[in-house]
C-alpha cells in the first residue's frame, strides 16, 4: 500500500515497528500534494523544508528506538486559525496575510509533544465564518467541501494527510466531514484547550478533529486533550436514539431513505437497539440562543478589526457583526442563561440512549463553491456542547458521500468514541469508497 | 411577564441600525434585523430560572 493511503493509526504503528520511515512517509504525502493540491487547494502554507527536516529528526530518533509520543513522525494539517510559532497564520483574511505568531496554540504544542509533524496550515473560510476560501471538494471539484474547516477535511479526503485539526462554532466540522467522506469529532468544549486560536464565539468555539477512521480521531484526541480521555469498551448493546422530526424535515428525500435503510440493517443486528427519540420543547430555542450569542460575540471580537479593515469582510460576516452591535447586554446574558436550560433539557435524551443519531448534513455537498452548505443539522449539538461525530456511511446518487451524525452526553467523549467505533464496524465505508470513488484519490 | 412583541423589538432595532449605519445601509440588513427581532422576542418570552448563570 502506498504510504498516503494509510490511516493515521496505521502509519503511526508502522513507524513504531520500523516498517515505515518517517522520511518516506512525509515524502509520499508531499508528492501526493504535488499531484492533487493544484486542484483541491486545501493548504495556505506548507513549509516543505521544515517538514522534511523534522521527518529526518523523527527517523533518527525512531532508529534509536526513541519515540516522542504516539504520533511520532506522523504529519498532520492544522486549520489556519491555530497559532503556529514561526509559521504564517492568516485566519483566511487579508489583515493577517503576513501574520507570523511567536507562540503555538496549545493544540499545536500537544501535537508536537506527541511526535506529530506540522505538515502545514489548511484553508479556513474568512475569519471562520461562511464566506468561502478557494478549497474544492476532492470527490467532485465542482462541489463545495463545506466550511469553515474546508481545507482540513478536504486534505484528509484527498490523502494529503491522514489527520487534521479544524474547529466548530456552529457546523464547521460535522458538515465538511460529511461532504468529504471523512470521520470527525467535535469533543466537549472543556476537553481541549482553545488557547491561541482565533475566536469566532468564545462560548461556542470547539476544537474539531478529522481522520479516516474512529481510531484516527481518537488517537488525535488523546494527544491534544487536557486530561486523558477515559477509554471505555463499547456497551454490549448500543442504544441508539434516532431523532427524525426536525432533522428529517430539513433533509433531502435521498438522505432520509438511505439513513433509514442503514438503520433497518442496524436494528436487526445483535448489539444494537434502534429507537425513536423525541426532542424536548426547549429544542425550539436553539436558533434564537445560538444566533444571539454568535452575533454579540462576533461583534465584540471584531470591534476594532472591522472598522480598520472593512473591505476584508465578506457580506455574511459583515451582516452578523452589524446586527451583533445592536444586541443589549441583557439579551446576551438571557441567551447565555437559557443555554443552560437548553443543555439540561437536551441532556435528558441520554436517559434512554447511549448515542443520538441524525443526518450530518441535509444532503451531499451542494454544487458550486460560492457557499459552504447548511449547518442546520450541527448547530443544536454545538450549542448543547455534546461531543459529536460524523461517520461517512453511504454515497448519494451523484457519487458524493453522506454522513451520520452521532452525539453523546457532555464529557462522554470516551464512551461516544467506543459506541461509534462499534457502529463504524457495520459500515465498511472504505470498501464503498474504493468501489465508487470518482474523485482525486487513487482508491 | 409582559409579552415581548417581535414587531416592536424589530422597530427598535431598526431605529438603532439607522443611527449607527445610516438609513440606506440599515435598509440593506432589514431582513436580518427582522429575523433577529423574532429571535429576541422568543428569548424574552421564555422564563429563565434566576439560578441559571450565564
Image (cartoon, helix red, strand yellow):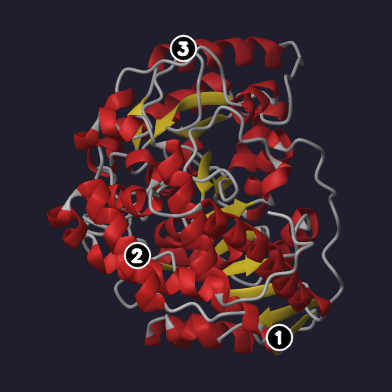
Say yes or no: labels 3 and 1 on the same chain.
yes
Say yes or no: labels 2 and 1 on the same chain.
no
Tell me the residue at 54%/88% (across/down): A245
Task: Give the chain letter at badge 3.
Answer: A
| Pointer 2 with pointer 1, Cβ within 8 A | no
Residue B12: which numbered mark, if any? 2
Q: Which of the two marks, 2 or 3, is nearer to us in this view?
A: 2
- Cα–Cα gap, marks 2 and 1: 48 Å
Up-down relation of residue A275 to residue B48 (above or below) = below
Near mark 2 (Cα within 10 A), the count class, few <14, some 14-19 or many ≥20, is some
Residue A273 on image: x %, y %: 76, 84
Q: Of helix, strand and loop, which one carries label 2? A: helix
Q: Which of the two marks, 2 or 1, is nearer to us in this view?
A: 2
Q: Which residue is mark 3?
A: A86
Q: Is residue A224 left or right of residue A198?
A: right
Name the one closer to the observer, A143 or A400: A143
Residue A393 on image: x %, y %: 52, 70
Q: Is residue A434 left or right of residue A116?
A: left
Near mark 3 (Cα within 10 A), the count class, few <14, some 14-19 or many ≥20, is few
Tell me the residue at 79%/83% (across/down): A270
Task: Give the chain letter at badge 1.
Answer: A
Name the one closer to the observer, A138 or A366: A366
Q: Which residue is mark 1?
A: A274
Q: Is residue A224 left or right of residue A74?
A: right
Q: Of helix, strand and loop, which one carries label 3? A: loop
Whether residue A374 appears in this view of the structure is yes
- Cα–Cα gap, marks 2 and 3: 48 Å
Residue A89 on image: x %, y %: 41, 24
Task: Give the chain letter at badge 2.
Answer: B
Up-down relation of residue B25 to residue A409 (above or below) = above
Whether residue A378 appears in this view of the structure is no
Amino acid at each position: 500500500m502506498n504510504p498516503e493511503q494509510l490511516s493515521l493509526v496505521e502509519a503511526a504503528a508502522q513507524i513504531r515497528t520500523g516498517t515505515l520511515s518517517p522520511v518516506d512517509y512525509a515524502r509520499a504525502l508531499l508528492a501526493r500534494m504535488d499531484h492533487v493540491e493544484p486542484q483541491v487547494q486545501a493548504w495556505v502554507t506548507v513549509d516543505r523544508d521544515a517538514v522534511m527536516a523534522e521527518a529526518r529528526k523523527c527517523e533518527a530518533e525512531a532508529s534509536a528506538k526513541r519515540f516522542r509520543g504516539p504520533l511520532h513522525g506522523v504529519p498532520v494539517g492544522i486549520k489556519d486559525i491555530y497559532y503556529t510559532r514561526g509559521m504564517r497564520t492568516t485566519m483566511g483574511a487579508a489583515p493577517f496575510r503576513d501574520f507570523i505568531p511567536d507562540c503555538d496554540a496549545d493544540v499545536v504544542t500537544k501535537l508536537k509533544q506527541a511526535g506529530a509533524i506540522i505538515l502545514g496550515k489548511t484553508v479556513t473560510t474568512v475569519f471562520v465564518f461562511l464566506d468561502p476560501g478557494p478549497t474544492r471538494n476532492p470527490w467532485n471539484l465542482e462541489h463545495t467541501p463545506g466550511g469553515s474547516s474546508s481545507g482540513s477535511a478536504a486534505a484528509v479526503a484527498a490523502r494529503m494527510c491522514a489527520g487534521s485539526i479544524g474547529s466548530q462554532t456552529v457546523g464547521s466540522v460535522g458538515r465538511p466531514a460529511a461532504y468529504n467522506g471523512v470521520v470527525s469529532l467535535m469533543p466537549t468544549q472543556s476537553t481541549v484547550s482553545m488557547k491561541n486560536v482565533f475566536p469566532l464565539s468564545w462560548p461556542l468555539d470547539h476544537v474539531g478533529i478529522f481522520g479516516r477512521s474512529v481510531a484516527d480521531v481518537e488517537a488525535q484526541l488523546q494527544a491534544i486533550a487536557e486530561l486523558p480521555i477515559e477509554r471505555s469498551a463499547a456497551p454490549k448493546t448500543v442504544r441508539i436514539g434516532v431523532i427524525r422530526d426536525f432533522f428529517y424535515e430539513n433533509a433531502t428525500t435521498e438522505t432520509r431513505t438511505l439513513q433509514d435503510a442503514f438503520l433497518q440493517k442496524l436494528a436487526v443486528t445483535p448489539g444494537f437497539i434502534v429507537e425513536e427519540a423525541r426532542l424536548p420543547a426547549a429544542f425550539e430555542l436553539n436558533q434564537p440562543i445560538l444566533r444571539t450569542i454568535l452575533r454579540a460575540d462576533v461583534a465584540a471580537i471584531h470591534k476594532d478589526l472591522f472598522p480598520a479593515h472593512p473591505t476584508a469582510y465578506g457580506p455574511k460576516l459583515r451582516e452578523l457583526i452589524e446586527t451583533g452591535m445592536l444586541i443589549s447586554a441583557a439579551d446576551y446574558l438571557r441567551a447565555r442563561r437559557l443555554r443552560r436550560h437548553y443543555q439540561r433539557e437536551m441532556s435528558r435524551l441520554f436517559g434512554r440512549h447511549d448515542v443520538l443519531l441524525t443526518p450530518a448534513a441535509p444532503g451531499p455537498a451542494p454544487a458550486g463553491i460560492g457557499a459552504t452548505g447548511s449547518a442546520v443539522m450541527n448547530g443544536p449539538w454545538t450549542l448543547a456542547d455534546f461531543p459529536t461525530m460524523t461517520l461517512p456511511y453511504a454515497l448519494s446518487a451523484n457519487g458524493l458521500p453522506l454522513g451520520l451524525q452521532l452525539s453523546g452526553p457532555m464529557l462522554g467523549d470516551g464512551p461516544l468514541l467506543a459506541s461509534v467505533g462499534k457502529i463504524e464496524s457495520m459500515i465498511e465505508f472504505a470498501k464503498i469508497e474504493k468501489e465508487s470513488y470518482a474523485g482525486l484519490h487513487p482508491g | 411577564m409582559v409579552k415581548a412583541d417581535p414587531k416592536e423589538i424589530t422597530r427598535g432595532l431598526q431605529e438603532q441600525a439607522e443611527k449607527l449605519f445610516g438609513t440606506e445601509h440599515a435598509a440593506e440588513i432589514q431582513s436580518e434585523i427582522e429575523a433577529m427581532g423574532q429571535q429576541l422576542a422568543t428569548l424574552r418570552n421564555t422564563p429563565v430560572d434566576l439560578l441559571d448563570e450565564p
